[in-house]
Amino acid sequence: MTTGVVITHAYRTAVGKSGKGTLAQTRPDELLGLLIKGFLERTPELDPALIEDVIIGCAFPEG
Protein backbone atom coordinates (compact mmCIF):
# COMPACT_ATOMS: atom_id res chain seq x y z
CA MET A 1 0.00 0.00 0.00
CA THR A 2 1.29 3.43 -0.93
CA THR A 3 1.62 5.85 1.96
CA GLY A 4 1.98 8.99 -0.13
CA VAL A 5 -0.69 11.19 -1.62
CA VAL A 6 -0.42 12.62 -5.10
CA ILE A 7 -2.59 15.45 -6.39
CA THR A 8 -2.03 15.64 -10.11
CA HIS A 9 -4.69 18.08 -11.27
CA ALA A 10 -7.70 20.03 -10.08
CA TYR A 11 -10.68 20.38 -12.41
CA ARG A 12 -14.23 21.63 -12.28
CA THR A 13 -17.27 20.98 -14.37
CA ALA A 14 -19.27 23.61 -16.18
CA VAL A 15 -21.87 25.68 -14.35
CA GLY A 16 -25.29 26.51 -15.73
CA LYS A 17 -28.56 28.11 -14.71
CA SER A 18 -30.44 26.11 -12.10
CA GLY A 19 -33.29 24.18 -13.70
CA LYS A 20 -33.17 26.14 -16.97
CA GLY A 21 -29.70 25.89 -18.46
CA THR A 22 -28.24 23.49 -20.98
CA LEU A 23 -27.02 21.21 -18.18
CA ALA A 24 -30.37 21.02 -16.37
CA GLN A 25 -31.02 17.47 -17.57
CA THR A 26 -27.44 16.27 -17.04
CA ARG A 27 -26.82 14.16 -13.95
CA PRO A 28 -23.79 15.03 -11.78
CA ASP A 29 -22.31 11.55 -12.22
CA GLU A 30 -22.39 12.04 -16.00
CA LEU A 31 -20.42 15.27 -15.63
CA LEU A 32 -17.98 13.52 -13.32
CA GLY A 33 -17.47 10.71 -15.83
CA LEU A 34 -16.65 13.23 -18.55
CA LEU A 35 -14.28 15.04 -16.21
CA ILE A 36 -12.38 11.85 -15.30
CA LYS A 37 -12.28 10.69 -18.92
CA GLY A 38 -10.84 14.06 -19.96
CA PHE A 39 -8.28 13.93 -17.18
CA LEU A 40 -7.07 10.50 -18.30
CA GLU A 41 -6.87 11.65 -21.93
CA ARG A 42 -4.75 14.66 -20.91
CA THR A 43 -2.50 12.53 -18.69
CA PRO A 44 -1.39 9.61 -20.88
CA GLU A 45 1.65 8.93 -18.70
CA LEU A 46 -0.64 7.85 -15.85
CA ASP A 47 -1.68 4.20 -15.83
CA PRO A 48 -5.39 4.20 -14.79
CA ALA A 49 -4.82 0.84 -13.05
CA LEU A 50 -2.64 2.66 -10.50
CA ILE A 51 -5.48 4.93 -9.36
CA GLU A 52 -6.71 3.69 -5.99
CA ASP A 53 -8.99 6.52 -4.90
CA VAL A 54 -10.57 9.62 -6.37
CA ILE A 55 -11.84 12.28 -3.99
CA ILE A 56 -14.60 14.51 -5.31
CA GLY A 57 -16.10 17.60 -3.75
CA CYS A 58 -19.35 19.43 -4.40
CA ALA A 59 -19.55 23.15 -3.74
CA PHE A 60 -23.32 23.46 -4.29
CA PRO A 61 -25.01 20.17 -3.33
CA GLU A 62 -28.43 21.79 -3.03
CA GLY A 63 -28.56 22.20 -6.79
Image (cartoon, rainbow, N blue to C red):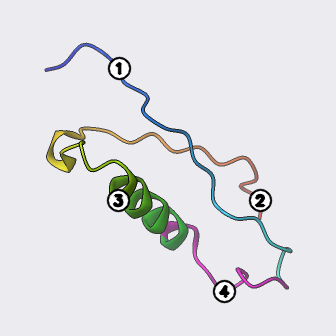
Residue at mark 2:
62
Q: Which mark is residue 5?
A: 1
Neighbours of disc 1 within 10 Å: few (<14), some (14-19), many (20+): few
Characterize the local packing of mark 4: few (<14), some (14-19) or many (20 or more) Cα atoms within 10 angstroms.
few
Q: Secondary structure at mark 4?
A: loop
| Figure disc tally | 4
Which residue appears at 80% of the width and 72% of the height? 16
Q: Quadrant of residue 13?
A: bottom right
What's the CA distance linking mark 1 and mark 2?
30 Å
Label 4 sits on what residue type? Gln
Q: Quadrant location of the N terminus?
A: top left
Crowd rating for badge 2 (residues with CA inside 10 Å; few <14, some 14–19, many 20+): few
Frontmost residue, 50 versus 52? 50
Residue visible at 57% across and 47% down? Answer: 11
Q: Position of residue 36 (x, y in %)?
A: 41, 57
Closer to the observer: label 1 or label 3?
3
The answer to whether 35 is drawn above or below residue 6 in the figure is: below
Q: Residues within 10 Å of mark 3 (few under 14, many from 20)?
A: few
User: Pointers 4 and 3 in contact (CB under 8 A)?
Assistant: no
Whichever of callouts 3 and 2 sits on the residue coming sooner in the sequence is 3
Task: Write down the residue under mark 3.
Answer: 41
First of labels 2, 4 by sequence position: 4
**Residue type (three-letter) at the residue carrying disc 1:** Val
Of labels 1 and 3, earlier in sequence is 1
Mark 3 to mark 2 CA distance (whole Å): 30 Å
Estimate the spatial distance between the alpha carbons at disc 1 and disc 4, rounded to whole Å: 35 Å
Q: Which residues are magenta?
A: 20-29
Q: Amino acid at mark 2?
A: Glu
